[in-house]
Amino acid sequence: MGGDYGPKVVVPAALQAAAEFADVDLVLVGSEPAIEAALGRTSAALDGRIAVRHASQRVEMDDLPSQVLRSKRDSSMRVALDLVRDGEADACVSAGNTGALMATARFVLKTLPGIDRPAIVSALPTKTGHTHVLDLGANVESTSRHLFEFAVMGSVLASAVDEIVRPSVGLLNIGQEDTKGDERVKEAARLLTASNLHYIGFVEGDDIYRGTVNVVVCDGFAGNVALKSSEGVAHMISDLIRDEFERTMASRLAGLLARPVLRRLAARMDPRSYNGASFVGLRGIVIKSHGSADVVAFKRAILEAVAEIRKNVPERISEHIASVLVEKEAV
Amino acid sequence: MGGDYGPKVVVPAALQAAAEFADVDLVLVGSEPAIEAALGRTSAALDGRIAVRHASQRVEMDDLPSQVLRSKRDSSMRVALDLVRDGEADACVSAGNTGALMATARFVLKTLPGIDRPAIVSALPTKTGHTHVLDLGANVESTSRHLFEFAVMGSVLASAVDEIVRPSVGLLNIGQEDTKGDERVKEAARLLTASNLHYIGFVEGDDIYRGTVNVVVCDGFAGNVALKSSEGVAHMISDLIRDEFERTMASRLAGLLARPVLRRLAARMDPRSYNGASFVGLRGIVIKSHGSADVVAFKRAILEAVAEIRKNVPERISEHIASVLVEKEAV
């Protein structure tokens, strides 16, 4: 049980999720005394739907993935993923070290047949909905074939979670013209054009927030840069809004009167409502919460896991990839 | 004279800049009749400080750079760059096709000795100042040596324009730990650590808007993605603010009372005050304005050119690169 706050956040979030969904059982993995302390007596009301599994180690935020794999076999992260592998859990939700979680998930769960590289995907907000963006940083280097796999996985995820028949897919580039970009992006565009995906062409960074397509595909470096830059701008603007409303007596008064508006605005900009990135391409569901998630945000990550379990996301990716591979062989 | 609006924007912006700075002379390059029509009689007051140079062709936004080089030798873009090469102008400011402008600038002006690839750099806002970010899209692929050159150029620009003795430089990556990123970024980090630049290490996308360093260095793909994603988020948030203040009678009233605050906020978020990206690494000053720039924004791009002329930016980059190369040879 990791993240910046551990059981203090994860346990209440789990209790709230269990209370909200009567068919969801949760296993809390980590230091048993710490979890029991956070649970108190509230869990009794949930009729045995919350279980505790002790793990003697914890993965730190600066642990190297290779060290974790080698020497933290009884970490809460590893034990939780073992539960998924053994069918004792349908998904793993973690706020821990991203690199270690991905490496352990790949090692324990393995990738789906036909998938070479798992990816991190998240729904980023638009004015009226959201855009699924991947890869957000699981891979530092990606070939055109990997970008193609990301497109298939993103398309299946959007189709399953948002119930869109043929989600539109765009490839992130630095211009919309066919002549733009490096050879890798151009080759990925060729693969996508020849596929049965609803590929619409190159898109640019601003298209993510414009909702031009349902799925934006990019390599993990570009995706992570897009995500972090966006977070940076949103944070700066929030600060500017606060600053300006606190500047003078008159602006403080205006802020008081505008409070309901500013609250609705804050709710629509709230990054917590987008917490929970999916690791796709694995034989199991793994959801990564932001390390600094609070109870509201972590609960959102649990609900993302529930949605993916209900929609059988890994099986659907597997089927779709298989159909793409069969098509290729048939050519 | 390009961009989305041509002389209608460029001419009034030029007149305003000339009126503001008594030592700045301007040559307007493009279709003479169109420019004269936009000038009207206002230019007489400027005492011959505004000249007009006719060009019979214009570069369209979708022209390929190679076509422009070959068959548009009398375009306003080419003629303006020829003036810089021939010493008849100290800088070229254009709102035209970025790819064509860069290709023509490289061809006409040539790169500085020791610089393999010019880059596009712009100052992006932080809460209290700005961060120079490069490359924003001049190059689709960059080696570690290119990233190193970008760092030198960005450092010199920040030093000259902001009068900082040793600007701090960060290398954009998807994590701050030394183990993060691909080999290219790691090798660039080694080159920077061994240099006399004030290199502080890896930074992430959000550091751009946090002002962690004076200069953020990245390849053109990542830089362009960061810039466009940021623009997308800022645009979406502006829309959300407008939406929320127009939603009900009560929120419209609150908006009316908050108008001075919202105006100050809009001014601080105004992308026009950051218009004007520099092409660095060339034997001359070239400033690229946003294609959709209005008069205020285009004037800002002209003022960026004036600032770089006054600070002798190309000469300073040239000297700094030379000192780096000498150091290397001395080793």
Image (cartoon, coloured by chain):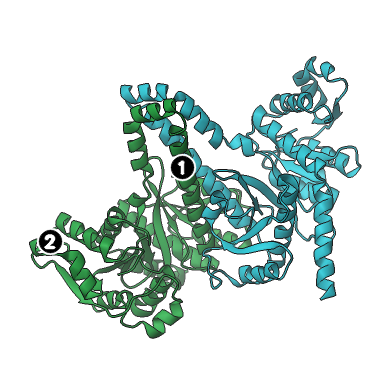
Chain colours: A cyan, B green
Tell me the amino acid under the disc marked 2: Thr
- The image shows residue B33 at horizontal and vertical percentages of 21, 74
Residue designated by label 2: B42
> Dot 2 falls on which chain?
B
User: Is B97 located above or below residue B108 in the figure?
Assistant: above
Element on which disc 1 rests: helix
- The image shows residue B54 at horizontal and vertical percentages of 23, 77
Report whether mark 1 lies on the same chain as mark 2.
yes
Depth order, front residue of B329/A263:
A263
- The image shows residue B82 at horizontal and vertical percentages of 28, 78
Q: Is residue B88 visible?
A: no
Residue designated by label 1: B239
Tell me the amino acid under the disc marked 1: Asp
Q: Quadrant of residue B188?
A: bottom right
- The image shows residue B26 at horizontal and vertical percentages of 19, 67
- Tell me if label 1 and label 2 are in contact, CB under 8 Å: no
Q: Residue at x 50, y 33 (%)?
A: A265
Image quarter of the N terminus of chain B: bottom left
Q: Is residue A195 left or right of residue B108?
A: right
Q: Residue furthest bottom?
A: B70
> Dot 1 falls on which chain?
B
First in residue order: circle 1 vs circle 2:
2
User: Is B203 located above or below residue A7 in the figure?
Assistant: below
Q: Is residue A70 left or right of residue A248?
A: right
Q: Residue furthest top?
A: A41
Q: Is residue A156 left or right of residue B44?
A: right
Q: Quadrant of residue A294?
A: top right
Element on which disc 2 rests: helix
Q: Residue at x 86, y 41 (%)?
A: A84
